[in-house]
Image (cartoon, rainbow, N blue to C red):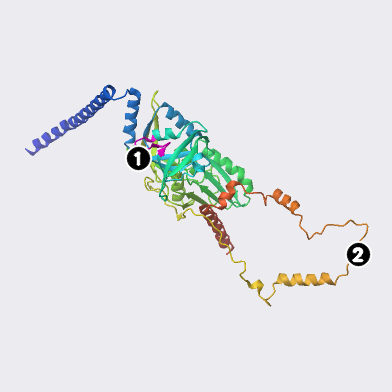
Amino acid sequence: MRRYLKIALLGSCILTFPLIAYAEKNDTLQLLDLFGEVFDRIRSDYVEEVKDSDLIEAAINGMLTSLDPHSGYMNEKAFKEMQVQTKGEFGGLGIEVTMENGLVRVVSPIDDTPAAKAGVRPGDYISYINDEAVMGLTLSDAVEKMRGPADSKVKLTILREDEKEPLELSLTRAVIKIKSARAHAEGDDIAYLRITSFTEQTTELMRSEFARIKKDLPNLRGIVLDLRNNPGGLLEQAVSVSDAFLKQGEIVSTRERDPSKTKRYNAHTGDELVEDDVPMVVLVNNGSASASEIVAGALQDHKRAVVLGTKTFGKGSVQTVIPLADHGAIRLTTARYYTPSGRSIQAKGIVPDIIVQAAKIELIKGNDKMRSEADLRKRLETLEEKKAKAKKATEADKPETPANDNEEAKPDSSKDNSKEKNKDNAKDGKKMPLTTEEIAATEDFQLQRALDLLRAVNVYNQTAVEK
């Protein structure tokens, strides 16, 4: 009896599975019928005539944007613009954005663009574009409204956490030509590498920039890799930048819904930018997102660099761009990023090893009237002062040599020829005027802390060797 019961239950299960699949398929068909009914009703009864293509595109985009803030539909025009952007040149304001709570949230302004120059900050919310409310727009629609011909104006209304009133900013659109990597020497011992985004040329440009400044670094003792306000970009570029500083090991893994489709990206020996014993600091902040977080996480997990700054944005998902024949493309979230140690970046970000908030550097003027030991009467003389006194006394005892009438008067060597000295200093590179970038570096509190850290490590290592 029990045997027959088992057979009966097994038979019912076999019959149930096809029924469930059929029921699900039938439900999907009914929902598609519902969509068709709504579509027909809009076409026939909406107060104004609407193009079928606009309705279908809006429906597709709505389906994708309902999934997460980073999925969406791009028509042919938007798809072409996206392809141009990844090549490092596009038109607009130079701002990376996402959608949050119905408003456009700034992930990061890109360096040397209209948005950066106007003072747009990571974390700002854009509530109005040219006095039109953003609420109700899709992310694609909002981005399209911010784009336009070069030299045309656009007005943004910004909501900022530490401002009581909305900010009104007027920006002039420009053709955004991104130099995604640049470098300069900090003194003769530290290389400063700045990556603003991860485009197709980023790794190649970073290497060429480093080669350019290497001659100015005879005593290379450290590298600062600045990823602040870097909104991300291409995954393969994040991998190749990380690979430039790692000899081996995993850089990042991407995990899809199907576990068998997990991908792991590893470093390769022989293509390192510098030796792995050169200390590194990676600078990050809440504008560092996606590909920036991959690089910071990989170097942090491998103990290759100290991460300094503030917690990153926390975008740990992979978007795959899937072209659609003659109809643009869809941008679909297909996987999550994981650091080499297995940490998910999503909504957590990278927490720095050393947290340093952005701050202004202000010199505190000392009291010039304060006395020191050197000002005290009858103090002990230094050895140098005693030698100077003895030399002066010896020279005073020498008889004066009469001047020769045939000799031309020579200028007093004790007087400085300031013009000649300035010329020599300019030639030697000692007193050349500071560039805008160098002036900014001296006022950058987080960068100065990174430089202090690298130089302190070098002093400590030298002390340890001497012992």
Q: Residue furthest left?
A: 1
Residue 464 visible somewhere in the drawing? yes
In the rendered image, the quadrant that contains the C terminus is bottom right
Query: Which quadrant holds the N terminus?
Result: top left
Magenta part of the chain: 128-139
Local secondary structure at mark 2 = loop
Contact, mark 2 vs mark 1 (Cβ under 8 Å): no
Say whether residue 429 is left or right of residue 140: right
Q: Position of residue 253 (x, y in %)?
A: 40, 42
The answer to which quarter of the image holds residue 5 is top left
Q: Look at the numbered disc 1 and give the secondary structure of its residue.
A: loop
Closer-to-camera residue (426/237): 426
> Mark 2, mark 1: which one is toward the viewer?
1
Instruction: State the CA–CA distance, disc 2 to disc 1.
Output: 92 Å
Q: Residue beneath label 1, please?
A: 102
- Amino acid tagged 1: Gly
Q: Nearer the viewer, residue 404 or 46?
A: 46
Q: Which mark is residue 402?
A: 2
State whether residue 422 is above or below residue 270.
below
Q: Is the residue 343 above or below the residue 82 in the image?
A: below
Q: Earlier in the sequence, mark 2 or mark 1?
A: 1
Q: Is residue 263 visible?
A: no
